[in-house]
Image: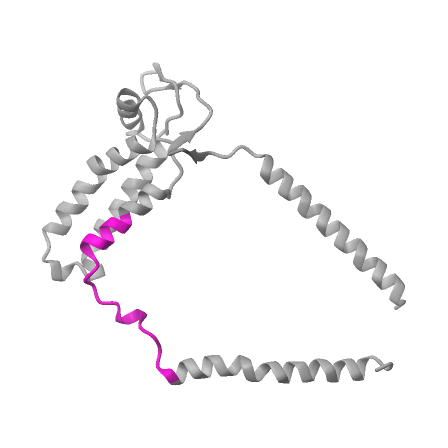
Amino acid sequence: MNRTLLDKMTVTRFALVFLGSSVILLTWASTTVVCLVNDKVTVQPFTVADATGNTSLPFACGSHSNCMGYCNICADFYGAPTMECLLQMLNYFCMPQFEHGMKSMNSTDWCIWGNVNSLYSNLSICTEDISDCLVIPWPNWLVEQTFVDIHSRFFKECPTEEFSDPPPAIVFALVITPICLIPVMVGLVVLKTKNGDGSS
């Protein structure tokens, strides 16, 4: 194939790929996104009807059965679903069940996943449900901090043998294999270039 024609085709392909990427990026950047600014949720305010059809909230509220209760609490005490309201909800509705379940076990049983997985999963579901009801993105920094606190309180003494370093022989093999393959690959590329292109 003609080298000039091939170069023109490559430039044309690159321009099309660049143009397509730019359009996708601009489209993505122009969409409306729910985000956290100064620890408060910024959403477009609108009125939501509760189960009886009464419109009472000047902000978005989820559609689950318990959502109106959570949203009303935030409206009454904080005026809107803020991160502070979410923190209070997590501390009041989610954490007591988890802590009660953990304290009902011996501390030696905390490190056995089969003993704590349902408590842990229920806590995760609770944080997600309340965040969804308050139309706060999940996961968020507050939920992450909640789980970090839980791990530091209940699981810091758990052994982590499964994450220990592999034996030195395996580490050596994993490091030396790619290093040895590099000269072989370079040699194959040079050999292929000499055989495929008669000018070299």
Rendered-image quadrant of the C terminus: bottom right
* Quadrant containing the N terminus in the rendered view: bottom right
Q: Position of residue 54 (x, y in %)?
A: 34, 14
Which color scheme does this rendered protein use? one colour
Residue at 73 percent across and 82 percent down: it is 190
Q: Is residue 106 left or right of residue 7?
A: left
Q: Start and end of the magenta stretch? A: 147-168
Residue 197 in the image: x percent, y percent?
Answer: 83, 79
Quarter where residue 25 is shown? top right
Give the residue at x 46% y 34%: 34
Whether the magenta-drawn stretch holds residue 102 is answered as no
- As for residue 160 lying within the magenta part, the answer is yes
Q: Is residue 199 above or below residue 137?
A: below
- Residue 75 appears at what percent x and percent y? 30, 21
Determine the residue located farthest toward the top in the rendered image: 54
Left or right of 7? Residue 188 is left
Q: Quadrant of residue 62?
A: top left
Count of marks overlaid on the render: 0
Q: Seen in the image, is 102 located left or right of residue 75?
A: left
Above-or-below relation of 114 to 168: above
Say which residue appears at 67% left-offset and 47% top-offset: 21
Counting from the top left corner in percent of width and height, residue 167 is at 35, 81
